[in-house]
Amino acid sequence: MLPTTLSSPHSTNVTPTPSVSPLSPFSPSSSSSFLSLPPSSSTLRRRRCLNSLCVFGDTHLRISPKPKGLKVECLVSEPLKVMISGAPASGKGTQCELIVQKFGLVHISTGDLLRAEVSSGTEIGNKAKEFMNAGRLVPDEIVTAMVTARLSREDAVERGWLLDGYPRSFAQAQSLEKLKIRPDIYIVLDVPDEILINRCIGRRLDPVTRKIYHIKNFPPETEEIKARLVIRPDDTEEKVKSRLEIYKQNSEAISATYLKIMTKIDGNRPKEEIFKEIESFLLQVQKDTEKMEKSGNTLLESKSHKIQASASEDNWRGIPTKLNNIPHSSEIREYFYKDVLEATQRAINDGRTRLKVENNIPELNPEMDVYRIGTLMELVRVLALSFADDGKQVKVCVQGSMGEGALAGMPLQLAGTRKILEYMDWGDYGALGTFIKIGSVGAKEVDEQDDMFIIVAPQNAVGNCIIDDLKAMTDAAGDRPVILINPRLKDLPGSSGIMQTMGRDKRLEYAGSFQNCYFFRLLYYAGTQYPIMGALRMSYPYRCELYKRIDEPSGKEKYVILSTFTERPTIDEINDAFQGKPRNEAKNTSGIWGFLSGIF
Ligand code: AP5
C-alpha cells in the first residue's frame, strides 16, 4: 500500500465570517505548514487570513488601497482533486507515490484496482483479466462503476484524490462530467515512445509494498526485495505497443474535456525533477484556491488559479477574440490592461524588482501598420495609478532624445510621448505631481522619495544605445522596482556599423536581467498576419500558456489551451504542440509558425 498518512486540512464549505477582531494575519509560511498536519476529520476547520479588497474603478481600472489592518476569518480550501494521465509507463505510478507522500491525497489507480480484483479472483477480476492481459481496455461499465464507488468514499471526499489511469476514453470522461466530478488540474506526462517501451520491459513490481522498480533505472534496494519482484503480464514489447496505440487513439478526446486545466509535463527526466514541477503546480493550485476563498473571489485574486487549473472557470475570461480588428475595442484594451496589471502586482508583491512587460497585441506592436501610442499610454496610466493608489510614489519615465548633432533624435514610436503623458487625464485626485511624476531615463532621474519606476518602451535607436542610461538608472534605484513596458533592447548597428561602448554580451546580459512578468503574442503562419492561429500568454507567476484559435461552426472564434511551458517555448515546441506531437520527438525543421516580429 502506498503511504497515505499525510493529509491536507481541507474542509467542506461554510460561509466565511467577516470579523475585525485582532486575528493573526495570514502568512505564506502558514499556507505551507498545513501539509504536515495530521489527517483531517470531518470537523470544519477555518484558517485566518487577511482579506484584501480590490475594486476596479470605472475609468482607470484603479485598485483601491488595501485596507491596512482589516483582518477577516476565512476558510480552508476544498481538497485537491488531481488527474494524472500519460502513455503506458510514462511514470504515472511513480509520480503518484511521490504526490501521495507530499500531499496525502487518496491515490486511485484503476490499473491497481483491477489487478487487485484479478489476484483475488473476483467476478470483476475474471472479466477484466482477459482484456488486461491482451493489452486492451477493460469495458467502461466495469471500470466506471469501480471508480465512482471509490471516489465517493469518505477518505477521498475529505482528503482529496489523485486519479491515475482514468478516464481512458471519451465515454469515461463524459461519465465523470455527468456526475460533475472534475479535477482541479489534469496532468499529462509526456514521454517519447521508444523510452516507454524500454521502461515497460524493465519494470518490476514488489507485490508486498506495491513499489515500482526498474531493473536499470530504479533497481531494488536489497537482494531480498529483488527475489520477490514480479513482472506484469502486460509488460511485453508487443502488448506495450498495443497499449500505446490505444492510448494515442483516446488521448485527444480526453484532453479536449480537460483542455483548460491540462498541463503537459516533460516526463523524460529524472523522477525527482518531474515531481518538483508537479509539486509546484499543486502548491499553486492549493494557494490560489485558498486565496479565492479567503477573498470571496475578488477580481484581483480570483483569477490566478483559474487561468491554469480550474474547470469551473466562470471568472476567467480566456483570450479575447477579434484581435485582428484594429483599432481594438475598448473591451479588448481593458482586458489587457487588467491582465498586465494583475501580473505586475503579483510580481511586485513577491518582491521582484527588475521586471518587464511585453504586450504585443497588434495595436501595441510597432511592426504592424496600426500602432497606437494611446494604448501604450493608457496601459502605463493603469499601472501607475494602481500603484499610486497603494500609496507608492511612482515615476513614469520616457527616454529623451539621444545622440548629437545631425544624429540627435528619438525613436519614432516615442515621439511626443512625454507631452501626451503630461496632458493625460490622471484622475480627479491630483495624482500627477503628487504620487506620480514624469521623468526621463538616467541616474539623475532617481529621487529619494521615488518608490518605483515605470519606463515606457525604452529602446535602442540606430547609432544610440539606451542601455548605459538605463543601467545607471537601475543602479541608482537599488532594490526599488523598475518595470519596463514593451522594451526593445536588442542590438542595433550604429551609424558607423559599430554598436556603442560596452560589449554586446554585456548589453544582452543586462537586457536579460529583467524578468518577464507579462508576455502576450499572437501566432500566425510564417510570413503572414492572417488568420491568427493561436497565442502565447504568460502572466506572473504562472507558466507560459499556448492557445490555439478555433473557428466555431456558429462563426464565433475561441481560444483553447493546447499546452503550458515553464519557459517561453521555442518555435519547434510550438509546432509540435499544434501538431499534437509529444515533446522530445524529432524536431520539425520547417516551422509553420511565424511571429509578428523577429524578437521572439
Ligand atoms: P495501468 O496499470 O494504469 O497501466 P498503464 O496506464 O499502461 O500505465 P503503467 O502502469 O504501465 O505505467 P505508469 O505510467 O504508471 O508508469 P510507472 O510509474 O509504472 O493499467 C493496466 C491495464 O488495466 C490497462 O492496460 C487496461 O487493460 C486496464 N485499465 C486500467 N485503467 C483502465 C480504464 N480506465 N479503462 C479500461 N481499462 C483500464 O513507470 C514505468 C516504469 O518506468 C517503471 O519501471 C519505473 O520505475 C520507470 N520510471 C518511471 N519514471 C521514470 C523516470 N522519470 N525515469 C526513468 N524511469 C522511470
Image (cartoon, rainbow, N blue to C red):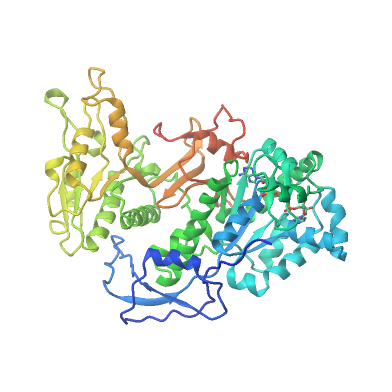
Q: Position of residue 395 (x, y in %)?
A: 18, 51
The residue at 40%/71% (across/down) is 295
Query: How many numbered discs?
Result: 0
> 544 left or right of 84?
left
Q: Is residue 589 above or below residue 85?
A: above
Q: Position of residue 554 (x, y in %)?
A: 60, 53
Q: Position of residue 252 (x, y in %)?
A: 67, 48
The residue at 36%/67% (across/down) is 27
Q: Is residue 180 above or below residue 270?
A: below
Asked whether residue 562 is in view, the answer is no
The residue at 61%/30% (across/down) is 586
Report the quarter where the N terminus lies. bottom right
119 or 431: which is nearer to us? 119
> 434 left or right of 64?
left
Asked whether residue 394 is in view, the answer is yes
Give the residue at the far front of this rendering: 223
416 or 326: which is nearer to us? 416
Q: Is residue 529 above or below residue 109?
A: above
441 or 549: which is nearer to us? 441
Q: Is residue 50 above or below residue 509?
A: below
Report the quarter where the C terminus lies. top left
The residue at 25%/39% (across/down) is 458
Give the residue at the far top of this rendering: 496
> 73 left or right of 589?
left
524 or 218: which is nearer to us? 218
Q: Position of residue 46 (x, y in %)?
A: 45, 77
